[in-house]
Amino acid sequence: MRVPNRWYGGYTVDVEVDDVVVRKGLDLETLPLPSVKFAFESGRDAPVGVRLTERLPESVQREHVAVHADYGGQGWTAFDDGRLVYTGSVPPGDTVVTLLMVWLSEPDHIYGFLGQPHLRVTSNPNAPSLRPVGVETDLLRVDGRFASDEPFERIRAAVERALTTPADAATDRPGSGSQPVAAPPAGGTWDDTDGAAAGAGPTSGASVTEPGREALPEPDNDWPHPVVRGGVGELAPPEEATVDDLLDQPVSPGSHLVRVETRDSYHGGGAVVVAQELANAFEIDGRQVTGDGRRDIVDAVVVTDQSAGRIVEALVDRPQVVDVFVSPVTAEDEAAEPVIDDVVETFEELAADFDPVDAAELEAELDETEFPGPDGDEFTITELVEGEVDAATVAGDADDGELHTLQEEIGRLADHVADLEAELDELDGEPADVREGDSEPAVEPDTDD
């Protein structure tokens, strides 16, 4: 269904990201209730994906907001932290319009919807990063059967009166709890002329360009892991003691250190809200909050298969969040300490596979081992060790380095053989009764007999 190309009161606020502009304003004509209108236009050559995040004002309850099936209602999702998120695609050269319908208990509550939305754009209309993260909640949805009747007409008329009442008069009105806008928010325009009401398309002078995410492929300062930032982009890495407290257990695969600077908001303490949202969305290995309640730091280790950039995108949309620091963390490579019982068991298994070697048999085998000389002569180990063969004769045409190495090896073997011979001599010098164990001593015959 077609939406009139008009903006009530001429008020619009534009946000531009990557050649895609969303214009936000008020529509009091299309639906029975006052609506916030969003019109997307793209200067790209191919369809793009968009995600728009709108914050529900404190004065408006979630059950008083609805979306219409004929005006992009299928793209809206509500979350329990007050976010209303629209996801969709924008073809090149086309305008995509969606409406957010509001039932207002007080007409001047419409001012709460005149702020700047948050826009994200992706080249892939079906990019997984477009999907918002959080705890979803019910959102009222209506279709063509939702028709205008007298109560709706009264609400719309009251909103029109609230919007056309001068700011100073509304402020002086007895009992008025409203906070009318004396000047449009940054990035917006306010013009009560008829010419402004017919304006269409983004106004270049009123556009706001969202800063891109800062991805740091190199370690940030002394932080040993890659970092992805969002928000202000000035949050320092956590202290070593903080990391030790959060990582006091083995690091799980998919672990990310999330550090968020928060401010207080109308939802309560910003840090409390963010910490709870992290717990709702991810598996938490550890978390802590520091600060004075007005500005806090939330540190947490979350386990997820989402990328660090995806976590940043999910957090920066929230009004409590000032700065975001996300980094995937991995455990340091540490060799496991051997278990003594396991070592003993392994040794016993290996020993069972080999027969014990008798020293005499080993020595005899070595004596029979021969090494060929350069001219085909063969020398036994005994001949080499006892010096019966000159090292130069064995080396032949070898260079000085090889000759020196061979001499060292022969010397080492000679020392080893000397040690073995010394041990054999000690054994030969022991008494026969010691060597023969428990055998009875021989009895010599009596010569007197």
Image (tube, grey):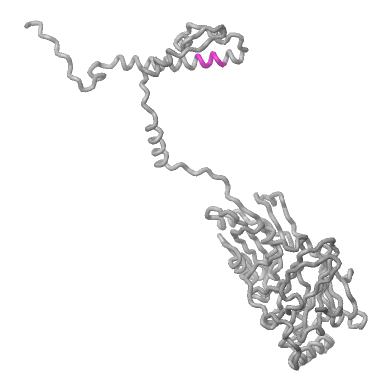
Q: Name the residue: 89% across, 81% down.
A: 197
Question: 298 or 108, which lies in front?
Answer: 108
Task: Decide if residue 127 is in sight here.
Answer: yes
| Residue at the far right in the pictured view | 195
Give coordinates of residue 342: x percent, y percent: 41, 41
Q: Which residues are magenta?
A: 405-410
- Residue 399: image quadrant is top right
Give coordinates of residue 181: x percent, y percent: 81, 81
Question: 276 or 149, which lies in front?
Answer: 149
Give coordinates of residue 134: x percent, y percent: 64, 69
- Residue 88: image quadrant is bottom right
The magenta stretch spans residue 41: no
Question: 371 or 183, which lies in front?
Answer: 371
Give coordinates of residue 173: x percent, y percent: 78, 91
The quadrant in which the C terminus is found is top left
Number of marks drawn: 0
Magenta stretch secondary structure, dominant = helix
- Residue 104: image quadrant is bottom right
